[in-house]
C-alpha cells in the first residue's frame, strides 16, 4: 500500500468515526461529537447528504500535509467534489480526486462520477454515506458501480485505475473500505471488476454480519480491523 492510499484510508476511517458521532441539533452532544451539527427537517427527521462528509473531510485535511481545492473543473470538463494536491518543485501537483455520494443514487449518477475518477488518471476516493441499509442495499450499489466500471473495458489506457472505495453506514456505526487497483498485468478487466465487489453481509437487528469479504477493511464502533478470506 503506497503512502497516498494509506493516508486516504486513514482519512476515511477518521471521517467515518466523526460521522457516526455527529449530533442533530435537537439532541444532546457527546464528548465524541464533531463541531458540526445536523439540522432537522419540518417533519423532525434528520437527513444527511454529501455536503456534511465533504466539510468534515476538509477539516481532517487541515491537520495533514495536503492542500485541497473544492469543485475544481478537471481536464475532462467534469467537476470533482474535492481535489487533493501536494507541493512538488514549488508547484501544486494534483494527486487525488474525491467523490462524495449519499444514499442509493441512480445508475446514471454513479456512472458520471465514476467517469470523473477513471478519466482523470490519478488516484480516486469514493466516499459513500448511507443512513442505514438492509441486506440488499450494498449489492444494489455494487451492481451499479460494477456496470459503470465495466463500461470502460474497451477503452483502457496505459495508466492504472486506482480508487479507494469507502461505504459508511451511520445507523450501524459500520464502515467497509477496499482499494480498487487495476493495471494490465492483472489480466481481464471485467473479471477483476466483477470480483472486486465480493462483499456478502446480512443486516441483523443491531449489527452487520459479514460472511464473505476478500481484502475489505471492516471498521465498526469499538471494534475495528481487517477482514479477509
Image (cartoon, rainbow, N blue to C red):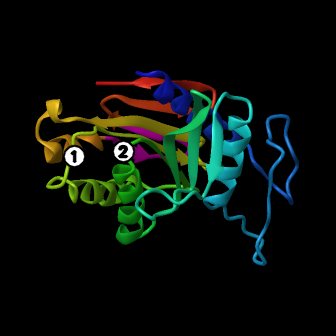
Q: Is residue 87 above or below residue 39?
A: above
Q: Is residue 73 above or below residue 61?
A: below
Residue drawn where x is 72% and y is 68% of the image: 45
State whether residue 136 appears in this view. no
Q: Where is residue 149 drawn, in percent x and y?
A: 27, 54
Q: Which residues are magenta?
A: 199-210
Which residue is disc 2 drawn over? 121
Residue drawn where x is 58% and y is 32% of the image: 86
| Circle 2/circle 1 CB separation < 8 Å | yes
Which residue is disc 1 drawn over? 157
Q: Where is residue 229 drawn, in percent x and y?
A: 28, 24
Q: Is residue 71 magenta?
A: no
Q: Nearer the viewer, residue 29 or 184?
A: 184
Q: Residues within 10 Å of mark 1 (few under 14, many from 20)?
A: few
Q: Where is residue 124 drawn, in percent x and y?
A: 44, 43
In the displayed structure image, the side of residue 161 where residue 219 appears, left or right = right
Q: Is residue 142 above or below residue 20?
A: below
State whether residue 21 appears in this view. yes
Q: Nearer the viewer, residue 106 or 86?
A: 86
Q: Nearer the viewer, residue 92 or 41?
A: 92
- Which secondary structure lies at badge 1? loop
Q: Is residue 203 magenta?
A: yes
Amino acid at each position: 500500500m503506497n503512502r497516498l492510499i494509506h493516508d486516504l484510508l486513514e482519512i476515511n476511517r477518521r471521517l467515518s468515526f466523526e460521522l457516526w458521532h455527529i449530533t442533530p441539533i435537537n439532541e444532546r452532544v457527546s464528548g465524541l461529537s464533531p463541531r458540526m451539527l445536523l439540522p432537522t427537517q419540518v417533519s423532525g427527521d434528520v437527513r444527511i447528504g454529501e455536503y456534511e462528509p465533504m466539510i468534515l473531510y476538509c477539516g481532517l485535511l487541515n491537520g495533514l500535509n495536503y492542500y485541497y481545492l473544492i469543485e475544481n473543473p478537471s481536464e475532462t470538463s467534469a467537476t470533482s467534489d474535492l481535489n487533493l494536491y501536494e507541493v512538488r518543485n514549488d508547484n501544486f501537483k494534483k494527486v487525488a480526486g474525491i467523490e462524495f455520494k449519499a444514499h442509493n443514487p441512480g445508475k446514471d449518477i454513479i456512472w458520471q462520477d465514476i467517469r470523473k475518477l477513471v478519466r482523470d488518471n490519478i488516484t480516486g476516493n469514493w466516499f459513500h454515506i448511507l443512513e442505514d441499509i438492509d441486506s440488499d442495499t450494498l449489492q444494489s450499489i455494487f451492481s451499479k458501480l460494477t456496470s459503470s466500471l465495466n463500461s470502460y473495458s474497451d477503452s483502457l489506457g496505459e495508466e492504472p485505475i486506482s480508487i479507494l472505495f469507502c461505504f459508511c453506514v451511520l445507523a450501524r456505526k459500520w464502515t467497509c473500505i477496499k482499494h480498487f487497483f487495476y493495471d494490465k498485468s492483472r489480466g481481464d478487466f471485467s473479471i477483476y471488476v466483477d470480483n472486486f465487489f465480493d462483499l456478502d453481509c446480512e443486516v441483523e437487528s443491531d449489527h452487520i454480519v459479514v460472511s464473505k469479504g476478500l481484502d475489505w477493511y471492516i471498521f465498526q464502533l469499538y471494534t475495528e480491523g481487517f477482514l479477509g478470506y
